[in-house]
Image (cartoon, grey):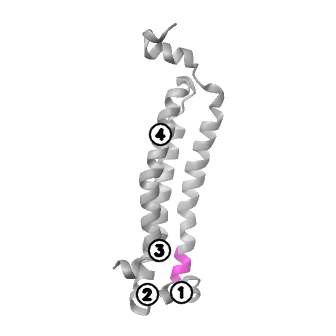
């Protein structure tokens, strides 16, 4: 199967879902974990963080469900029946249902970007002036670190 599938939208489907699903979410978790420790409690906005988290994951899911998996399946069928050259040709990619599905990715990408990335970036940037003092943080962590 890999001989026919490699180089189609099924490869892109796997790459997007796996890369963002694993490394992207780990990176977001590390960013939020560190931010939670650095930003003063009264300036932490759980609603914005939750909204961004769900928007990023729902946007990714929509990209996979509305475009990458269905388009990849259609392209895989074309590759098996007519060859990889046809499945990646201008005639196949730029016309018909494949092209319409490709435009559907914009729905998920919009949710991902405008509902997830933009609010999370806004949240982090606007909290730069609300950072905890390092002296107070060290004092609370370990009383033996006091001078």
Report the magenta stretch's main SS. Answer: helix
Residue 65 visible in the current orientation:
no
Q: CA distance from mark 4 to mark 1?
A: 41 Å
Query: Dot 3 corresponds to which residue?
Result: 9
Q: CA distance from mark 1 to mark 3?
A: 12 Å
Residue 118 in picture, x, y percent from top left: 61, 48
Q: Residue lying furthest bottom in this view?
A: 82
Name the one closer to the observer, 63 or 34: 34
Q: Are marks 2 and 3 in contact (CB under 8 Å)?
A: no
Mark 4 or 1, nearer chain start: 4
Q: Which mark is residue 78?
A: 2
Query: Dot 4 corresponds to which residue?
Result: 30
Mark 2 or 1, nearer chain start: 2
Query: Dot 1 corresponds to which residue?
Result: 92
Mark 2 or 4, nearer chain start: 4
Residue 132 in picture, x, y percent from top left: 57, 22
Q: Which residues are magenta?
A: 97-101
Name the one closer to the observer, 144 or 28: 144
Disc 4 residue crowd, few under 14, some 14–19, many 20+, Cα 10 Å: few
Q: CA distance from mark 3 to mark 4?
A: 30 Å
Q: Is residue 1 above or below residue 108?
A: below
Residue 24 in picture, x, y percent from top left: 48, 51
Disc 1 residue crowd, few under 14, some 14–19, many 20+, Cα 10 Å: some
Q: Are marks 2 and 1 in contact (CB under 8 Å)?
A: yes
């Amino acid at each position: 199967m890999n001989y026919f599938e490699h180089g189609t939208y099924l490869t892109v489907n796997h790459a997007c879902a796996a890369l963002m699903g694993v490394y992207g979410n780990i990176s977001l978790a590390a960013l939020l974990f560190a931010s939670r420790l650095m930003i003063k409690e009264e300036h932490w906005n759980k609603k914005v963080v939750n909204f961004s988290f769900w928007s990023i994951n729902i946007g990714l899911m929509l990209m996979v469900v509305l475009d990458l998996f269905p388009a990849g399946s259609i392209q895989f069928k074309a590759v098996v029946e007519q060859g990889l050259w046809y499945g990646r040709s201008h005639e196949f990619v730029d016309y018909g249902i494949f092209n319409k599905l490709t435009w559907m990715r914009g729905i998920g990408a919009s949710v991902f970007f405008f509902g997830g990335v933009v609010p999370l970036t806004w949240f982090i940037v606007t909290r730069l002036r609300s950072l905890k003092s390092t002296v107070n943080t060290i004092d609370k962590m370990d009383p033996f670190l006091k001078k």
